[in-house]
Image (cartoon, rainbow, N blue to C red):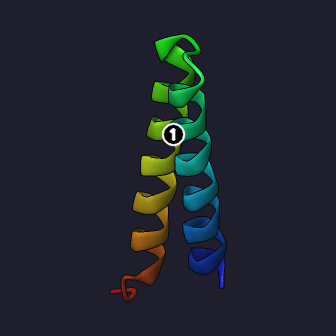
Amino acid sequence: MWSVLLFGLAGLLVGGALSFRSQGLPNWTWVSFGALAAAALVAAYLLTLPAS
């Protein structure tokens, strides 16, 4: 369940990053949104791994 929510959050963050980049905002804004999206994707992937 949490992985689905994190994948959705990552999609929203990527969309925000692309929007901020097209609007010409400072680089740190869209780069930080991209980094947060990548962190959400990694967290979602780690939640899908079986417990050992």
In the rendered view of the protein, which quadrant contains the C terminus?
bottom left
In the rendered view of the protein, which quadrant contains the N terminus?
bottom right
Residue topped by disc 1? 18
17 to 48, vertically: above or below:
above
- Seen from the viewer's position, the closer of residues 51 and 35 is 35
Q: Residue 4 location in percent, x, y?
A: 60, 79
Which residue ends up furthest to the left in the rendered image? 52
8 displayed left or right of 18: right
- Seen from the viewer's position, the closer of residues 3 and 16 is 16
Q: Amino acid at mark 1?
A: Leu
| SS of the residue under disc 1 | helix
Residue at the (44%, 61%) spot, across then down? 41
Residue 26: image quadrant is top right
48 to 30, vertically: above or below:
below
Q: Residue 51 location in percent, x, y?
A: 40, 86
| Label 1 environment density (alpha carbons within 10 Å; few <14, some 14–19, many ≥20) | some
9 to 31, vertically: above or below:
below
Residue at the (66%, 72%) spot, across then down? 5
